[in-house]
Image: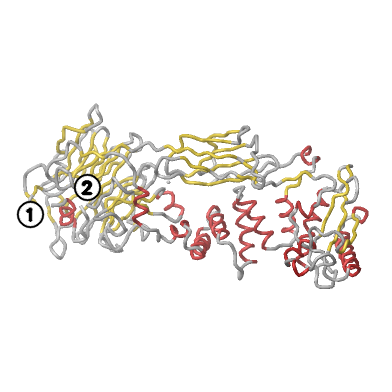
C-alpha cells in the first residue's frame, strides 16, 4: 500500500496523498569632452521629442536608448507614447515585450500583463510569450529541468511506510509505521508515529527512535515544522485530542494541525489545536518560512479549488496565527496540491497531480514565491524534473541550502517499502558567461570597453576591462540566478543584457555588439548622415515645410543650439526626372525654405547658407539623359532626392572647401 493512501483516509476524502534593478548610469560629457564636439544622438532625440516633434521611428529609438541603459521609468514613458501613436499600425512585437518589462520594473503590473499578453498573442512562437500563457510543452520542460545527480535511499527506511523528512538541529524527523501497536485497517500496518534519527559523522542518519509520548498517540502523527528558534513545533495528527476521537457528519475522522512548545527539560508539551482546525475538513502538512512569519499547509476547507489546496497563514509576533489564505490558481488546481515546503530563498515547493508531470504526484516549485506573493508579481510554476520526480508518487520535498542536503519521499520502484525517504546533495551548478565586445556595424573589436557583472538588483559583483582581443569572461556564476551584464565604451551607447542562468552547468555567450552613440563633429561632416535624417519631404511641386520634415529639422536645430559656433550649408538635391532647369529651381526653393525654417526658429542667418543642386549631383547611375530612367527602381531614384547639412565650420575649424 502507498503511504498516500494512509494519509488519504487518515486525512479525508480529499485524498491528501500521503528566485531591479539599479538603473544603468551613462557617463555624462564633461567640459573637455564637450569641447571635442561629441554628439550624443539620444540627447538630441529627447530634446526633439520633448519639443513635441514625434514619429514612430524617433520614439522607438528614444525608448530603446533608455531601455538598454536600464532607465526603465523613462523607457516606459516613451514606449507608452510609441504605443499610443502606433495604436492601429503594425509594430514589431519586441516593443510590446520591452514595454511590458519596463512597466513591470516600475511596479505597474496590471498594465505590464496587458502588453505581455499582446506580446504573446502577436508572436505565439516566442518562448517568452508562451511561458507567460503557460502553454509550453510540459514534457520538454521537464526534461530541460532535469539534472544529473544521485539520490540515495536512506538506511533508516524499512519495509513499511517511511516519509516526510524534516531536519531539526542534528536530527531528521520523519513519520513511519514501523512502531507496531494498533493496526490501521486500510493497509494493515500500524498507525504512523513521528521518529527522530541522529546525524552521523559520515552525514548519514541512524539510531531512529520515536518522539516522546506527548506527541505520538495510538492514531496517526506525521509531517512536522519547526519555528526558526527551534522552540515550537507544528505537526499533523488525526482529529484526536485529550483522548477524544472525533468524526465529521459522514463518519470520517479528519486531520488537524497541532502546536507543541519545548519546555525547560527539552520535552514537547503544551500541545494545542490551531484555531482553524475543524471537524468538517482536514488541515495537514505544515511548513514554516525561514523568517518564522508564515505557516503553509494543505487543506480541503471552504474555498478550496480542488481536492486539496495549499493555504498560508501569518504567524504573529506573539506566536498566534492569522486567518488562512488560499494561495489561489497560481498554485492550486481542481486536483491535489499538498506537502508544501518553503526554502530559505523563499521558493515554494509542493506536490501536485493537477499540473502536467511524469505521473502520480510530482514535485513543483515557484521560485522566489514569497517575494512575488508580497509584490503581487506573476509567478512561474516549474516541474523540478528528474531524478526528484518519477512516474510514481514523489512528495514531501525538503532542502537545506546551508548544508546542501535535500530529502523527498517516493514510492518509486527499487525502494525498501511502500514509501521511502530519499536523500541527495544539492549539486554545485556553476556557469561561465563570456563574450567579445565589438562595434555593431564594423565588427571591429572595441579595446578598453568596461564590462560589469551585476546581480538582479543591480549590485556590482565583478568588473573587467577588455584587452586587445575584446574578450571578457565571468566564472563561478550560480545556476538559476538572474544577472545583468553592462558594457560601456567611449563614443558608444551603453548596453545591458539581463539573463537567467539555466539549471545545468554550461557556458553562456552574451551578444556584446555596441552601437556608436557619439560622433566627433568635424568640418565637412554631414549632419543628415550622423542624425540618420532621411529625405526632407515636400509636397509635390512645393517647397513649404511639412510636419514630418519638421521632425527631422528639429534634430538639426537641436545640434545648432548645442554648438553655437557651428555653421552649416544646406544642400537640396533631386532625382533626374523632370527637366534639369526645373529641378534646379525647385531644389533651390526647397533649400532656402529649409534655411528660413531654421532662421524662424532662432538660428542666426549668418550661420546658414543654402543652395539647390537639382539633379547635378546624383549618387548613382540613374541619370535620365545618359540612361533609361525606367531601368532604375524607385528606391534608386530616392537616393538622389536627398538633403545635406554640411558642417562648414565648428570651434574655429573650417571645411577646406565646399564639395
Residue 490 place in picture, x, y as percent: 69, 39
Q: Nearer the viewer, residue 247 or 136?
A: 136
Q: Identify the element where label 1 is drawn.
A: loop
Q: Identify the element where label 2 is drawn.
A: strand
Q: Residue at x 42, y 53 (%)?
A: 373
Residue picked out by circle 1 = 185
| Figure disc tally | 2
Q: Residue at x 60, y 52 (%)?
A: 67
Q: Earlier in the sequence, mark 1 or mark 2?
A: 1
Residue 544 place in picture, x, y as percent: 84, 69
Outermost right residue:
606
Residue 306 place in picture, x, y as percent: 28, 63
The answer to which quarter of the image holds residue 160 is: top left
Q: Nearer the viewer, residue 394 or 139?
A: 139
Q: Is residue 546 above or below residue 495?
A: below
**Residue 410: mark:** 2
Q: Nearer the viewer, residue 374 or 571?
A: 571
Residue 499 shown left or right of residue 167 in the figure: right
Q: Is residue 98 above or below residue 412?
A: below
Q: Nearer the viewer, mark 1 or mark 2?
A: 2
Disc 1 and disc 2: Cα gap in Å?
22 Å
Q: Nearer the viewer, residue 425 or 438?
A: 438
**Residue 22: mark:** none
Residue 413 shown left or right of residue 431 in the figure: left
Tell me if mark 2 has few (under 14), some (14-19) or many (20+) residues whose alpha carbon lies within 10 angstroms of its own.
Answer: many
Amino acid at each position: 500500500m502507498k503511504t498516500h493512501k494512509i494519509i488519504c483516509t487518515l486525512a479525508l476524502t480529499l485524498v491528501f496523498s500521503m528566485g531591479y534593478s539599479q538603473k544603468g548610469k551613462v557617463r555624462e560629457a564633461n567640459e573637455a569632452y564637450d569641447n571635442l564636439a561629441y554628439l550624443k544622438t539620444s540627447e538630441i532625440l529627447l530634446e526633439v521629442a520633448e519639443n513635441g516633434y514625434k514619429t514612430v521611428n524617433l520614439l522607438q529609438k528614444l525608448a530603446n536608448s533608455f531601455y538598454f541603459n536600464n532607465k526603465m521609468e523613462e523607457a516606459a514613458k516613451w514606449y507608452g507614447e510609441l504605443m499610443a501613436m502606433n495604436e492601429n499600425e503594425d509594430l514589431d512585437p519586441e516593443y510590446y515585450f520591452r514595454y511590458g518589462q519596463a512597466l513591470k520594473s516600475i511596479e505597474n503590473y496590471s498594465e505590464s500583463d496587458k502588453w505581455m499578453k499582446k506580446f504573446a498573442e502577436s508572436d505565439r512562437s516566442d518562448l517568452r510569450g508562451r511561458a507567460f500563457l503557460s502553454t509550453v510543452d510540459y514534457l520538454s520542460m521537464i526534461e530541460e529541468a532535469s539534472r544529473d545527480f544521485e539520490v540515495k535511499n536512506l538506511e533508516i527506511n524499512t519495509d513499511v511506510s517511511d516519509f516526510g523528512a524534516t531536519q531539526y538541529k542534528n536530527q531528521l524527523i520523519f513519520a513511519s509505521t514501523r512502531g507496531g501497536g494498533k493496526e490501521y485497517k486500510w493497509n494493515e500496518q500500524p498507525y504512523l508515529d513521528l521518529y527522530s534519527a541522529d546525524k552521523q559523522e559520515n552525514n548519514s542518519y541512524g539510531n531512529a527512535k520515536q518522539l516522546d509520548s506527548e506527541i505520538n498517540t495510538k492514531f496517526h502523527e506525521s509531517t512536522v515544522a519547526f519555528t526558526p528558534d527551534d522552540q515550537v513545533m507544528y505537526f499533523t495528527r488525526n482529529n484526536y485530542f485529550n483522548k477524544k476521537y472525533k468524526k465529521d457528519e459522514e463518519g470520517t475522522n479528519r486531520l488537524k494541525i497541532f502546536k507543541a512548545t519545548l519546555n525547560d527539560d527539552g520535552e514537547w508539551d503544551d500541545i494545542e489545536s490551531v484555531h482553524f482546525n475543524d471537524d468538517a475538513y482536514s488541515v495537514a502538512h505544515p511548513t514554516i518560512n525561514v523568517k518564522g512569519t508564515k505557516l503553509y499547509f494543505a487543506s480541503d476547507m471552504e474555498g478550496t479549488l480542488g481536492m486539496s489546496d495549499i493555504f498560508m497563514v501569518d504567524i504573529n509576533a506573539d506566536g498566534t496565527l492569522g486567518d488562512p489564505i488560499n494561495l489561489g490558481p497560481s498554485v492550486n488546481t481542481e486536483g491535489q496540491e499538498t506537502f508544501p515546503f518553503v526554502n530559505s530563498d523563499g521558493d515554494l515547493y509542493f506536490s501536485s497531480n493537477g499540473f502536467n508531470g511524469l505521473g502520480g504526484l510530482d514535485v513543483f516549485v515557484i521560485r522566489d514565491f514569497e517575494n512575488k506573493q508580497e509584490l503581487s508579481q506573476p509567478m512561474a510554476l516549474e516541474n523540478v524534473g528528474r531524478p526528484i520526480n518519477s512516474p510514481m508518487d514523489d512528495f514531501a520535498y525538503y532542502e537545506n541550502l546551508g548544508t546542501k542536503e535535500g530529502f523527498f519521499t517516493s514510492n518509486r520502484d527499487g525502494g525498501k517499502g511502500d514509501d521511502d525517504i530519499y536523500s541527495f546533495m544539492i549539486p554545485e551548478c556553476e556557469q561561465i558567461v563570456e563574450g567579445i565586445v565589438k562595434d555593431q556595424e564594423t565588427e571591429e573589436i572595441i579595446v578598453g570597453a568596461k564590462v560589469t557583472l551585476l546581480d538582479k538588483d543591480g549590485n556590482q559583483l565583478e568588473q573587467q576591462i577588455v584587452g586587445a582581443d575584446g574578450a571578457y569572461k565571468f566564472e563561478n556564476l550560480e545556476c538559476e540566478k538572474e544577472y545583468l551584464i553592462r558594457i560601456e565604451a567611449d563614443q558608444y551607447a551603453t548596453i545591458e543584457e539581463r539573463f537567467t542562468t539555466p539549471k545545468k552547468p554550461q557556458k553562456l555567450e552574451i551578444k556584446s555588439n555596441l552601437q556608436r552613440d557619439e560622433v566627433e563633429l568635424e568640418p565637412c561632416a554631414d549632419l543628415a548622415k550622423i542624425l540618420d535624417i532621411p529625405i526632407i519631404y515636400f509636397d509635390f511641386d512645393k517647397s513649404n515645410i511639412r510636419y514630418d520634415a519638421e521632425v527631422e529639422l528639429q534634430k538639426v536645430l537641436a545640434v545648432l543650439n548645442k554648438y553655437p559656433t557651428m555653421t552649416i550649408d544646406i544642400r537640396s538635391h533631386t532625382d533626374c526626372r523632370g527637366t534639369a532647369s526645373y529641378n534646379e529651381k525647385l531644389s533651390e526653393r526647397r533649400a532656402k525654405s529649409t534655411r528660413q525654417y531654421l532662421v524662424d526658429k532662432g538660428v542666426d542667418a549668418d550661420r546658414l547658407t543654402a543652395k539647390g543642386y537639382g539633379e547635378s549631383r546624383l549618387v548613382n547611375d540613374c541619370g535620365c539623359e545618359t540612361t533609361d530612367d525606367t531601368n532604375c527602381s524607385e528606391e534608386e531614384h530616392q537616393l538622389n532626392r536627398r538633403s545635406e547639412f554640411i558642417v562648414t565650420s565648428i570651434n574655429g575649424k573650417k571645411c577646406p572647401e565646399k564639395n
